[in-house]
Amino acid sequence: MVNFKVFLSDGPAYFPDEERVQFATSLTEKVKHRLGAGYEHFVHKGEFTTIDGEEVAVFRWITRTAIAE
């Protein structure tokens, strides 16, 4: 299984900067990141950026959902 280094862009102002770089197994599926009592959802639309000399996929925030109880 391949892991892609990705950057989670946009989203709520309280999203911690130190959690923005993550790994994803696919560039075509949503990334769902747990934060507090919910999940932040991000999608890749073909954009890339360079972080520390490495090209990474940019996933843009689309929505937040609550954790089901």
Image: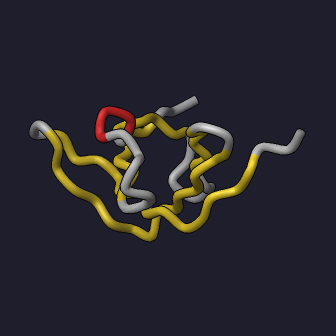
- Residue 3, above or below 10: above
Q: Quadrant of residue 9?
A: bottom left
| 7 on left or right of 64 | left
| Visual colour scheme | secondary structure
Question: Split into 4 quadrants, where in the image is the N terminus?
Answer: top right
- Residue 2, above or below 31: above
Report the front residue among 14 and 62. 14
| 7 on left or right of 49 | right
Counting from the top left corner in percent of width and height, residue 63 is at 60, 65
Q: Could you tell me which residue is drawn at 37 percent across and 62 percent down? A: 10
| 66 on left or right of 36 | right
Question: Split into 4 quadrants, where in the image is the C terminus?
Answer: top right
Q: Could you tell me which residue is drawn at 29 percent across and 47 percent down? A: 56
Q: Could you tell me which residue is drawn at 43 percent across and 63 percent down? A: 60
Counting from the top left corner in percent of width and height, residue 68 is at 85, 44
Q: Residue furthest left?
A: 53
Q: Could you tell me which residue is drawn at 35 percent across and 53 percent down? A: 57
Report the front residue among 33 and 50. 33
- Residue 15, above or below 36: below
